[in-house]
Image (spheres, rainbow, N blue to C red):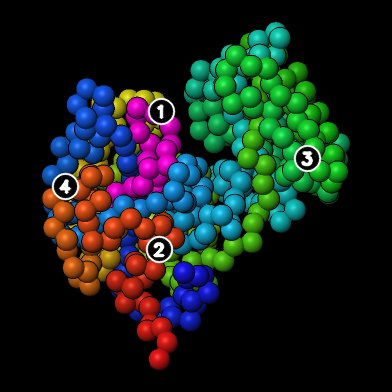
Amino acid sequence: MDTETILPQLVQRNEHKILLVVIDGLGGLPHSETGLTELETAHIPNLDALAHGAACGLMMPVSAGITPGSGPAHLGLFGYDPIKYQIGRGILECLGIGLAVGKDDLAIRGNFATMDAERVVTDRRAGRISTEENRRLVELIQSKVGEVSGVRVTVKTVKEHRLAVLLSGPSLSPAVTENDPQKEGEKLRPIEALSPEAGTTARVLTEFLQRVEEVLKPVQSRANTLLLRGFSRFPEIPTFEKRYLLRAACVATYPMYKGLARLVGMDILPTGDGLDDQLETVRQAYQNYDFFYLHVKKTDAMGEDGNFSGKVQALEQIDSKIAAVREMGFEVVVITGDHSTPAVLHSHSWHPVPFMMLSRYIIPDHVNRFTERECAEGMLGVFHSTEAMPLMLACSLRLQKFGA
């Protein structure tokens, strides 16, 4: 169904409020020894109790068999077709740390990395250098390489080994190849133009990397080169306010998710690192917004590290705090993930994600546990992520009747 065309005709304002809790990488796969997923293994009585009073189902982030990145997975959850709105990671990284991006600028996501004398990448994350070392190196690069061939270069620390690069100048294009070989033991790849219009950009980036490596060489750090990817410009995308008539706020700790939220017009609320801090931020700002997006990262990190027990512990830590959402007064509470990150795969996967929605305007389906197999029995069935926002709007009575 083309909800993008229909929703503007139906949406209306009211005082009902919505909370979307995204437990990153929520879904998993069975452990080889127990046959149980991370959710099935974890002791999560509060999530289970919430699910028992909710309408549950499984949410497909993009389409059957498609493994999503965090960007398309979140855009789907926010109600935007992730195929239509393909957003580069660079713009999310730059917006996430508060960089002002012009419509003709080129935003890039970067990593510090380690290469050997033959330009073979031996560590794609430079040993996960500290954020403090990152800042020191970025300040050095910025002082020495602030401009390349008439193009202004802005380099900013993100976190640990991650950084953002913003190019400002004429005739810039995202149609260039990445220099990241995507795995260790392979040589850095040349940055090449994918279209005639991208020739200038490829030359600027090649010179930029050469100069950065010259700057880093005498520092004797594990971080002696950069991996650049996610080349992107600011996309044209309707905001939450325009599309849903919602004043929306983001409560997240990682820059990329703040970037996603800023892209769709959410305000970014300052918060502490823990879920307790995030929930308190929501409480304090409750009167000021209609929609809150609260993002929890640790489950995804544990899944990508292949740490099954670590992901189980992260779920249990979340569970110990999550019951507080009951008392906050939201008309609609949704708890789900953006995608699955099974520890057995060490990565994102294509598997559908458990989803629960609490509202007085749903029929609870009495699912007993918030797990993949139990949610598959829920009344919402298996549905696409782009249908989540219409469900939230409907259960907050923000959609009028369609047709006569």
Which residue is at the front of the view, 59 or 73?
59
Q: In which quarter of the image is the C terminus?
A: bottom left
| Label 2 – label 1 distance at C-alpha | 28 Å
Name the residue type under label 3: Leu
Image height check: is 205 above or below 353? above
Sequence order check, earlier mark of 1 and 3:
3
* Residue pointed to by mark 4: 369
Asked if residue 353 is among those painted magenta in the image, a careful observer would answer: yes
* Residue pointed to by mark 3: 194
Q: Residue at x 39, y 68 (%)?
A: 390
Decide if residue 362 is on the left or right side of residue 389: left
Sequence order check, earlier mark of 4 and 3:
3
Magenta-colored span: 336-355
| Label 4 – label 3 distance at C-alpha | 49 Å
* Residue pointed to by mark 2: 387
Image spot of residue 180 (x, y percent): 64, 27
Name the residue type under label 1: His
Mark 2 element type: helix
Decide if residue 37 is on the left or right side of residue 241: left
Mark 3 element type: loop
Name the residue type under label 4: Arg
Image spot of residue 396 (x, y percent): 31, 72
Name the residue type under label 2: Glu
| Label 4 – label 2 distance at C-alpha | 23 Å
| Label 4 – label 1 distance at C-alpha | 25 Å
